[in-house]
Image (cartoon, rainbow, N blue to C red):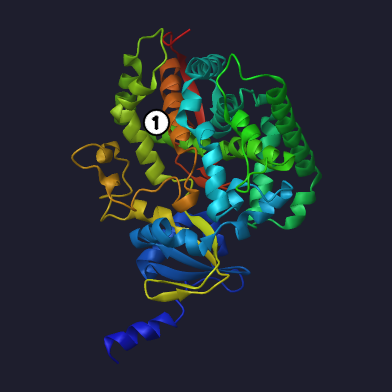
Amino acid sequence: MNGLQEVETRKYTKPPQMPGLPALGSALELMRSPLAFFVRGYHELGSVYRVRAANRDLYVLAGRQANLFMTQKGDGVLHSHELFGDFARELETEIFLVAMDGAPHRHLRGEMRDGYAREAYMRYLPEMGALIQNTARAWRVGETIPATRMLQRLVSRQLSQAIANFDAEPYFDALSVFLNTIMNAAVLKTWPRIMLKNPRYVRAKRRVMDMAREILRRHREEPVAGRAPDLIDDLLHATTIDGKPLSEAALIAATVGPMIAGIDTAANTLSFLLYSLLKNPDVLARVQSEAQRVPAAEYPTFAELKAMRALHGAALETLRLYPVAFAVPRMSVAEFEFDGYVVPKNQEVFVASGVTHYLPEFFPEPYQFDIDRYDAPRQEQRKAGVFVPYGLGAHTCLGAGMAELIIMFTTAMLLRTVELTLAPSDYVLRVRNMPLPRPDNRFGLRVMALKNGGAQ
């Protein structure tokens, strides 16, 4: 058989399949440690392979070429509507950013871009700094704080301030139940759909919708004069691609979207970052030194945060080791070829974008927490397609800049305000997917001392 015949034969041969258990296939491993599972599959089977997870048959594309394919060509053949459409329908609209594709999606992203930009957060830096410090100063020395839950609450409040000039604190528990249930039951389908009828979820959904309606009411009744316009103001003036105003259901969905997204993205990354700093005292000392250089009566500006190379490196290294968007789930809308194999139409596909974060050819000693990877001359993240913590393609996180700013600013302010240690002191990270990766519930922070420094 000549080379051309080998390629043609391979094209019409199914990719190799990961071995698994009878009936369940690889479902358990995929639920417990999905990124590690994808990395193992790449090393054992290559850049494209099949996975059976209970009653689901998946194709996995992994490695740098898969990331480049998704960035350059993927949006033409891999769509999100088929997977996120149930989420949108649960919100009673088809106009929901994560569930849209093509030109309508690009148009709506453009309408919302300014409201998601880091500048929307920067205008509230004094208020955000005071919120973080007041939260930390309410802790008692010797107290153990449930880390991830606290950070989720803190991020939720910051996000609602930045995008809506609103404090979502009274709605946090409802937002958390709503997000967890709808992601597991309507998107990931790891829970039965009947969970969307669960009374606890129904109550949470009603309260989240009430919050969105209250935010929209305030913005309609209170003119922009005297304050900077925010995402909600932009939404009230936004149109669909055919020039029609957004429906009330679409406005509610777009108001809720960024708040629930932050609970499981920026907050989880903050949890991993604080864990990594406390596990690496030498790195913690460098980051603390940078944070303390800002005069005690002031909050760090964006320029000062950018100059904190150790903090920036620690944030990037956390995003590399613990990417919350470690894979891009899509449905193929056309048959296409990747690395010699044909992916059929109507096939559920995971582009395992985070696999490259653990490949030593791009990141030497990939399991080591090394914050100096990102500075000259190394700059290991610069090669296209290898560092992709915010997703790929047209659906790359619209709020990535704001999220990175929240992560760095919150970390700097906490380290300026309070001295923390791990609780328990010998805690070793265990990652749970609920639905996105986060430290398990044993991860706590013990308050050792409150510091006098920091703006008042």
Residue 391 position (above or below residue 317): below
Residue 265 position (above or below residue 308): below
* Residue 16 appears in the figure: no
The residue furthest bottom is 1
Image position of 91 (left or right of 408) = right
- Residue displayed at 64% across by 23% down: 166
SS type, badge 1: helix
The residue furthest front is 243
- Image quadrant where residue 224 sits: top right
Give the mark count. 1
Q: Which of 91 and 134 is in front in this view?
A: 91
- Residue 42, x across and y down, in percent: 38, 64
* Residue 430 appears in the figure: yes
Image position of 227 (left or right of 312) = right
- Residue 63, x across and y down, in percent: 36, 60
- Residue 252, x across and y down, in percent: 70, 38
Check disc 1 and report the residue beneath it: 278
- Residue displayed at 72% across by 58% down: 192
Q: Nearer the viewer, residue 259 or 28?
A: 259
Q: Which of 219 and 444 is in front in this view?
A: 219
Within-10-Å neighbours for mark 1: few <14, some 14–19, many 20+: some
- Residue displayed at 52% across by 74% down: 344
Quadrant (top left/top right/bottom left/bottom right) for the N terminus: bottom left
- Residue displayed at 62% across by 30% down: 232
At label 1, the amino acid type is Leu
Q: Nearer the viewer, residue 434 or 258?
A: 258
- Residue 376, x across and y down, in percent: 20, 37
